[in-house]
Amino acid sequence: MRRAAADLADEIAQARDDAERIPDVSFEIFIAALEERLKRGETGAGRPGNTVVFSGMRQLRGLPYKVIVLWGLNEDSSFPGASHAEEFDLMKRFPRRSDRDSRTDNRNIFLDLLLAARSKFLISYTEGANPAQWKEPSVVAQELREWLLTFAQEPSDRLRASAILTHHLPLNAFSPKSFSAEEKQWQSTNRKMLEAVDKAAVANWNGPAAPWANALTARAEGGRLPVKELYRWMRNPAEAFLKRHGIRLSTGEEIDPAPILQRDKDLPKWQRIHTLLNVMLSAGAEGADQAVETLGARWAVDPRMGAQGLRDWRYSDDVVCARTAASLYWKLTSQMTALAPQEAAAVVPGFPWTLTHAASNLWRDASGAVHWINVVPGKITGSGAIQSLFIWALLRAAGAAAEGQIIVTDVEKKGSPLIGAPQWTPQEAQTFLSYFLKLYEAFQLGRLPFAVPPYQPKSRGAEAGQMPAERALPNAIVWRGLDQAQAEAYAEHLEKALEGLYKVGDLSALESVVQGMLTNAGSL
């Protein structure tokens, strides 16, 4: 697999032509091409030696090995394949003795591998979990088994031989059968799993599900904590907790690497406009048109952007949206002097963490006051705008900026794209951050089951009370056994209080929600 991936990467690099402005191949397209190559068997082979060698069936056929194992030889696999012919295929209609047949060739490969095994020849396949619907292995494995059983003359001998030839292994590692002495060389040696199975058996396989909240690592040792990480934790604590332990959950959504229409949900649209804004603001007002043209030429040949005739149409809409925000940014900063990016850090009294942020978009006006002007794809209630609140609070607490303006790209009717950041004093900014550090600390110590809001706005196609799958699954895992509804209700109140800060800047509503969460955490 490593060699197949390296070969594919080399082919992409050789085909790249900067003069034609061909875009980089996306990860999704690369994986799709690699899967197709693996299905076709174009995987190469490992280097033969005194180690375990993984290879396709064709590459090392005929080479003698002490043990040869064929994996995944299921009945519904593509091996040895099926013979089919098109109406115009004259070779199939009028076959000759010397004609090649892929099905026959694959049978010969199987025979070569069988003869190359010097000690053991193993075939694995999945028969399923329901004995009434067990699946058979590939037809070549069935034929081999039936041929071997012909040497058993009596029915009783045939049954004993069949039991010797086929060994049933449990599909799940936690199956009690995995630890049975009858498994002999197949017996599991996982001691921790055995202890867990024994506990489940004592509880008659019906014990209460212990919440992960009780297993949270009690860590509040402090250190540097990026303010963006604090915000991402607030947005989805369960997911952040799982990622910290190396667990990433798939949403189960299949992404078409070459869709007909561009995906216009919130995240894909945000990513496109975010890219456009970065290109425009990096190029400046004078070079923005050329930068947009260059990016448009790259996206015009990118299959992720939809069908060929629809890419320009969607791209022009995105450009108008991004240009409106960028023009306002240039207007605000036209009479200011850009400052170099700097590391902002603040320590909130009573907490062991030092909040940090690599601050950019800083400007100095004629009076010497420092402004932070940030452009955010999305709405005022979107994640980008709420994250800007956290960044602004850190900048104020650190004394890095005196004035703050936030520009959003998605404006409601009669709304303004320019939003003034709350006029907090450094002490008020520290108070804002302290609320979330209290929640963060309680979460780290396993005292606060804090879930994400239970629904998304109806404009996203979700009904009230319906939690998106990508949010429901982490909650169900981390907070199982607890009152999730109450935890989600607190998170909903918290998010509404955050959205209201842009309008009033008053921290009292936020304080009330946070104190309520901490006071009632034990009852959840």
Image (cartoon, rainbow, N blue to C red):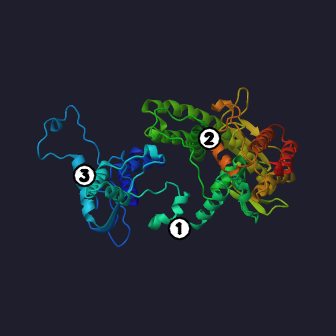
Are there few (<14), some (14-19), or many (20+) residues within 10 Å of tag 3? some
Quickly name the residue at label 2.
469
Identity of the residue furthest to the left in this view: 97
Closer to the N terminus: mark 2 or mark 1?
Answer: 1
Residue drawn at x 70%, y 46% is 235
Name the kind of residue labelled 2 in the image: Ala
User: Mark 3 — residue?
Assistant: 107
Instruction: Look at the picture and state if 20 lies above or below 89.
Output: below
Residue 166's x, y, as percent? 38, 57
Q: CA distance from mark 2 to mark 1?
A: 35 Å
Question: Do callouts 2 and 3 mark residues in contact (Cβ within 8 Å)?
Answer: no
**Secondary structure found at label 3:** helix
Residue 331 visible to an observer of this rendering = no
Q: Residue 7: x percent and y percent?
A: 36, 57
Q: Between residues 78 and 59, which one lies in front from this camera angle?
A: 78
Q: Earlier in the sequence, mark 1 or mark 3?
A: 3
Q: Return the residue found at the far bottom.
A: 50
- Please identify, in this view, whether the residue under mark 2 or under mark 3 is nearer the observer: 3
Instruction: Let me know if residue 520 appears in the view.
Output: yes
Per the model, the C-alpha gap separating discs 1 and 3 is 37 Å
- Which quadrant holds residue 132? top left
Q: Secondary structure at mark 1?
A: loop
Decide if residue 188 is on the left or right side of residue 448. Answer: left
Mark closest to the chain's N terminus, 2 or 3:
3
| Residue type at the position of mark 3 | Arg
Residue 392 falls left or right of residue 72: right
Q: Relative to the observer, which residue lies in front, 3 or 85?
A: 85
Q: Quickly name the residue at label 1.
A: 189
Residue 340 x, y percent position in the rendering = 67, 56
Of 118 and 130, the residue lying toward us:
130
